[in-house]
Image: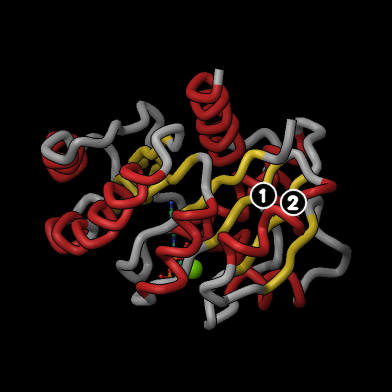
Amino acid sequence: MGAQVIAIVNQKGGAGKTTTAINLSAVLAESRARVLLIDADPQHTASDWSAMREKAPPFVLIALPQPILHRDIPKLAADYDFVVIDGPPRNYEVTRSAIAAADLVIIPVQPSGADFWASRETVKLVQEAHAFKDTQKSVFVVTRKKGQTALGRDIREALTTFDLPLLRTDIPDRIAYAEAITNGKTIIESQPRGPGAKDFRALLAEIQELAA
Ligand SMILES: Nc1ncnc2c1ncn2[C@@H]1O[C@H](COP(=O)(O)OP(=O)(O)OP(=O)(O)O)[C@@H](O)[C@H]1O
Ligand SMILES: [Mg+2]
């Protein structure tokens, strides 16, 4: 079986794409999978993160911020179990290419009206892709959830109006995520037994259920 391609996309800036892509890649690597992370953002945040590290990340990272992902990924994926794509903000062509390449599309959304409204465009792209690739799955994940707030509940309810499932696992707002990225680490490296590592292990378990 070939690599499973997971695209993390939302054209809304700051939705939590890079945080999700790096830490999901880290928990996949922890489970002994061979992981390729593709930085598809022209701002190259994931590549900058990697460049400041003292040692290589537990996965391979390449930058490919171009709308040729769907064409090149089958070749690039040959030696991997998973390919994770960190999508760009405000870039229709690259986002569409990442979605076209994916077996699973994850759309991170923060609990706010602005983030919900701005996700519509990406949902439309995903639904268009389904018409061509009916084996593709796509899900929302709520990111930066702040405790048990009304906003957190509202976003879950609002997202059900789209015809896409929502993961049970939320990614809470934790300073540890921002600190880990700032220090060139994954959440597994910075706090292996901390709550952030648990969040991403739970996210991975849920993704594995979807694939089963
Ligand atoms: N769960 C979280 N808890 C706390 N801070 C977070 C969380 N997720 C993301 N952040 C912070 O929010 C900011 C945006 O997150 P991130 O870079 O992951 O989003 P993005 O969707 O990749 O952004 P862009 O659209 O610019 O690529 C960063 O400063 C990051 O550290
Ligand atoms: Mg990013």
Q: x and y percent of residue 139 in the render? A: 36, 38
- Looking at the rendered structure, the secondary structure element under dot 1 is strand
Crowding at dot 2, Cα within 10 Å, few <14 / some 14-19 / many 20+, comes out as some
Q: What number is the disc on residue 83?
A: 1
Q: Residue at x 44, y 45 (%)?
A: 105
Left/right placement of residue 156 relative to residue 48 reads left
Q: Closer to the camera, 106 or 188?
A: 106
Question: Mark 1 near mark 2, Cβ–Cβ under 8 Å?
Answer: yes
Residue at 76% in and 36% down: 30
When the figure is inspected, residue 158 is found, relative to residue 59, above or below; the finding is above
- The image shows residue 22 at horizontal and vertical percentages of 62, 55
Q: Is the N terminus in the top left, top right, bottom left or bottom right quadrant?
A: top right
- Left or right of residue 34: residue 112: left
- The residue closer to the viewer here, 129 or 38, is 129
- Left or right of 83 in this view: 195: left
Q: Residue furthest right?
A: 55
- Name the residue tied to disc 2: 77
- Name which residue type carries label 1: Val
Which of the two discs, 1 and 2, sits closer to the camera? 2
Question: Any mark on residue 130, and which?
Answer: none
